[in-house]
Amino acid sequence: MTDWLLKKVLKDNPNYQDPIVRQRVGYLAGIVGVITNVLLSVIKIIIGLLISSISVLADGVNNLADSASSITTLIGFKISNSPADKEHPYGHGRVEYIAALIVSFMVILVGLQFTSSSIDRIRNPKPVDFEIISFSILILSILTKVWLSIFNKKLGDKINSTGLKATATDAFGDVLITSVVVLSILFSQVTTFPIDGVVGLVVSFFIIYQGIGLIKYTIGPLIGEAPSKEMVESIYEDLKKYDYITGAHDLLIHSYGEGKYMGTVDVEFPADIDVITIHNVIDKAERELGEKYNISLVIHMDPLEKETKERYELRRNVKDIIKKDDRVESMHDFRVLEDEDGKYIELHVVINGDKIDKEEIAEKIKEEIEESIETVSNGLRAKVIIDIDFNGTRG
C-alpha cells in the first residue's frame, strides 16, 4: 500500500533528497494522517458515548489531536520548502522542526485534559457496556494505527524527516493506548472496580510521557545538533582524495532543515603549490562534495610550511609530549613564527570534549599544554589554540 501510494505521488522521480519530492512525500503523509485520524476519532468518540467509556473517549480525542498534528505537518512541509528571502537567507527548513514541536505540545495538552476526566471517572464510576460491533471496530482501529505507524516511519526514513518519524512514534503509542483500552472494556465486564477510569488515567499519563519524548526528539535539531560521525568521516576521506590535499580539519556543519546544510572546512596542502592550481582543486571539491552530500561547502586553504629536518624533529617532539595527555585527540596547523619577542611555536590542539570536566575551561587546558610543549621546544615559546571536539568533527 505504501509503495503504491509513493508511486502515484512521485511518478518517475524517486530522488527523495529533491526538495519537491520531499514536499510531495510530506503532503502524502499529512493527507493520509488527517483522513485516517479523523475517521478513527469520530468512530471512537461515538463508541465511547454509546458504551459510556471515558478511556475510549480519551483515545478518540487523542486521535483528533493526531489529525490536527497531521495538518500541522502539512503546513510545516509547505512553509519549510518556501524559498529563501531577505529576512531568511538560509531558507525556512527549520519550520519543519517547529511543526513537530507544536505536535508535541498538543499531545501533552490532550494528556492533561484527560487526566482530569479520568480522575473524575474514578471518583464517580459508571458501568461500561459491552457491544461486539463496537469492540470489533476498536480492534480494527488498532490494526489501522499499526499500519499508519509503519507508513510514517517508512516515509520519514526515506526523506529523513524528524516530523514524520515523530508522527510514527505517536502512532505506535496510539496502538498501545487502544490495546489497553480494549483490555479495560473486557475486564470491566467482570469487576466493579473503576477500571475504565484507571485505564483512562494510565492512557493520559502515557500520552503526556509520549509528548515529552516527542519534545526531546524535535528540540535537538532546533537548538543545533552535531552532524553524524559517519558523514564527518566520509567528508574527510573524500577530501583527501583530491590532488595536493594532504589533510583536513575543523569541519563545521550547520543544518537549516533536513537536506539543507552549510559547512566549512580547512584543508592542508604544500605551500609551494601554485595558488591558481590549488584554487581550481578546491573549487572542484566544493562543487562535487556539495552535490554528493547536499551541502553548501566552503573550503579554507591552509598551506603547510616546507619541511626541514629541524622543523620535523621539533614537530615530532611536540606531538610526542602532548600525546601523553589523554584529553588530546590530535594537533594541526603547526607553525614556527616570529614576532618582536623572537620565534615561537603556534599550533591547534584538538581536545576530546567527553574527557574534560565541565569545570575545566579552555584557558586552563591551554596553559597546561603550553607548559608541557615548552619543555621540548628548544627554548621557543608555545602558543596553543584549543579546539574542543564533541563528536569527531574537528579532525
Image (cartoon, rainbow, N blue to C red):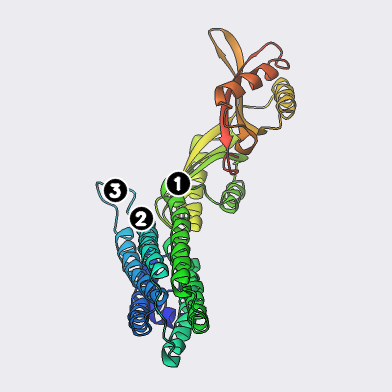
Q: Residue at x 43, y 51 (%)?
A: 219
| Residue 337 lies in quadrant | top right
- Residue at the spot of label 1: 224
Q: Is residue 244 above or below residue 56?
A: above
Decide which of 302, 395 is in the foreground and name it.
Answer: 395
- Residue at the spot of label 3: 88
Q: Earlier in the sequence, mark 3 or mark 2?
A: 3
Q: Is residue 366 above or below residue 241?
A: above
**Kind of residue indicated by mark 3:** His
Crowding at dot 3, Cα within 10 Å, few <14 / some 14-19 / many 20+, comes out as few
- Which mark is in front, 1 or 3? 1
Q: Earlier in the sequence, mark 2 or mark 1?
A: 2
- In the picture as drawn, the residue positioned furthest to the left comes out as 86
**Kind of residue indicated by mark 1:** Gly
Q: CA distance from mark 3 to mark 2?
A: 15 Å
- Residue at the spot of label 2: 98
The secondary element bearing badge 1 is classed as loop
Decide which of 389, 379 is in the foreground and name it.
Answer: 389
Q: CA distance from mark 1 to mark 3?
A: 17 Å
Q: Say if residue 263 shows up in the picture.
A: yes
Q: Earlier in the sequence, mark 1 or mark 3?
A: 3
The secondary element bearing badge 3 is classed as loop
